[in-house]
Every structure is written in structure tokens, then in C-alpha cells.
Amino acid sequence: MDDLTHTYNPLDVPDNTGAFVIDSALMPVRERMQIACVRSATIAFNNGEIAWFDGEETAALPAEELIYLASDSAHDYFVYDDGERSPDHEGYGAWENILQKSGAEAARVRLEFVDIRHVVGELPTAQMQLVWSALALTAWHRQARFCEQCGTPLVSDRLGRKRQCATGHVVFPRMDPAVIMAIVDEQGRLLLARNSRWLQGRVSVLAGFLEPGESFEQAVRRETREEAGVQVDRVRYLGSQSWPFPRSLMVAFVGYTRETAVKIDDDEIAEAFFATRDSVRERVANGELTLPSNASVGRALIEHWLSGKLG
Ligand SMILES: [Zn+2]
């Protein structure tokens, strides 16, 4: 049975502006360093928490391998990308080797690499900004191999906050904006859909990437019309969430419709329907429906609607 209660909700994150700053002129000082490690979109944990290592424990790490995330009053946070390595790949365990060479405490070297989407509710919300940055930046470095203007290789520059080719072209990290929307009808029912790639019973709200030149509101209306054949009237912004798998920014809306008939896009959507709160609770409880991961803003939108916040 799916658990309909959880602690992390990207739509309820308190305003923590100012908790972290990005110092674009940072000169790294070993005493202030805290370094995490990412491997294939998973992050190193030690004893159930993100494994942050200080400058002493990572002394063998070459400075050019550091990617800078952000700073607070006490620390500068970095990530090291241990790449796409798997146990049968040469160089596997590079991070553990660095820690051992640096003389880190043996118990600290025993790491578990965790998919953050499975544990997000257990982490302090303040850490999530650093985690999303770590995943987004490492994914971008892996992808941005060659210069789009001249085709020559790009190398990391300015503590990993940009990449540069031999000709001098500079490339900055990119995120792709996508809209995700709770579409609610006049009876307060929510539009749920199953993507044609998903297993039977798995449903979520609709989502889609922006087309060039579109506003968010236009994208909400276009995607809903294309995927479910429903005309959306009023659209209201609710919040956003970085989703670096590999580089989306999910922008969440509620949209209201007077229509009740659904006509799906057969290529992308296997089924779509308006559901009442009682039917969703009941069908989730008896295992007929599965909702998106606790970590996702899609789940947060559904929870918002279940608690009556979206009308
Ligand atoms: Zn170039």
C-alpha cells in the first residue's frame, strides 16, 4: 500500500533565501571545504546521511576535479563527480581511493550510493538545495563534452561553474524548463493520466517541456489540450522544483477547466480521467493506483489537491 503522508513537499518549502550564497570569486580554502560525491546520479551516504568530507579527508583530491556548489557562513560546499563507473569498470571506487590516500577514517570510507529520489523525505530541507545543485552540475559536466560553436572539447573552468574550449568559447550550465499541472474541473475532480510507457495503475498529473517562444501558461494549456483534449481556463503558479535527472526545472501550476470529457493523445498517454478525492484515496489504498515518488513535485500537487488546497 502506498503511503499518502510524507514530510518533504517542494510546494511547502519555507523561504530560505540567504541560507546559501554562490560566491563567484571564491578562492577555495581547505579549512572551509565540505565535499560530497556523486556517481551516476546517486550520491554518497555514510551512516544514513549525505557523506560530507572536509578538506583534510580529501587532501589527495586534485583541485581541478572540484565542482563548487555554494557557501554558508561556515563552509564552502563542493561535489566530486565519480562518473558513470560501475564495479567492473576500470577506476571504479576512485572516490574511496582518494579518501584512503588522504587518510580518512576507515569507517567513513564505507559508502553507500543512494538514489536521492528514494530518501528525499529523510533529509533536512536545507540540504536539498546543495543536493539538487550537485546532481545538476555533475550531469551537465558529463553532457557538455564539446563546444557547440566550434566542436572542440570543453574543459571545466572556474571551479566547475563553467566550461571552456581551446578557442575561448564559454559554456554555462543549462536547465530545461517543464510545466507540471494539476487540472481541476468544476466538481473539484483532478485530471490524472498514465503515460503509455508506465505500468498499469501508475498515474500522475500531466507535464511537458516548453516549446521555444512559449510562456509557462501557454505551455500548460497546450500540453493539456494535446495530451487530454481538455481546454484550460485560469492558470495559477504554485511553485517549482529542480529535477536534475538530468536537467529539468519543474514549474508547477493549477489549471481550472469547465470541461469533463477527455480525449487522449494515443501516442503518449494510455489513459486519462477525472477522479474524486475519495476514489483516489480508495484506489491507492487497495493498490489499484500508484502515485509518483514522494520526492516529486507531481506527488506534491496531488497531495495539495487531496488536502483541499486547490478547490
Ligand atoms: Zn569553441
Image: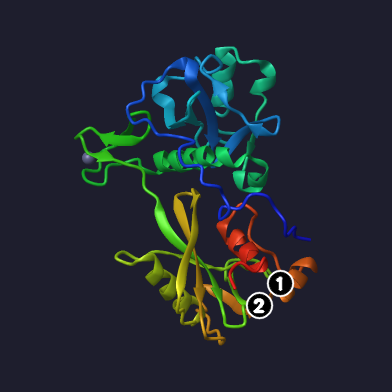
- Residue 196: x percent and y percent? 57, 71
In the image: residue 120, left or right of residue 38? right
Can you tell me which quadrant of the image ligand 1 is in? Answer: top left
Where residue 123 sits: x, y (%)? 64, 40
Whether residue 90 is visible here, answered yes or no, is no
Mark earlier in primary sequence (2, 1): 2
Horizontal relation, residue 280 to residue 219: left or right = right
Image quarter for residue 176? bottom left
Q: Quadrant of residue 288?
A: bottom right
Disc assigned to residue 275: 2
Image-based side of 117 in relation to 166, left or right? right
Q: Tell me the amino acid under the disc marked 2.
A: Ala
Q: For the N terminus, give its image quadrant.
A: bottom right
Q: Secondary structure at mark 1?
A: helix
Residue 146, image x, y percentages? 30, 41
Label tally: 2
Q: Residues within 10 Å of mark 2 (few under 14, many from 20)?
A: some
Question: In front: 5, or 12?
Answer: 12
Q: Residue at x 70, y 53 (%)?
A: 6
Labelled disc at residue 174: none
User: What's the residue at 58%, 69% (across, down)?
Assistant: 310
Numbered badge on residue 280: 1
Against 188, residue 177 (above or below) is: above
Q: Would residue 280 appear left or right of 77 to someone viewing this image? A: right
Residue sitting at x 31%, y 64%: 212
Mark pair 2, 1: CA separation: 7 Å
Which scheme is used to colour this image of the protein? rainbow
Taking 188 as reference, is 41 above or below it? Answer: above
Q: Does the CB distance between marks 2 and 1 fall below 8 Å?
A: yes
Residue 119 position within the rendered picture, expressed as x and y whole percent measured from the top left? 66, 44
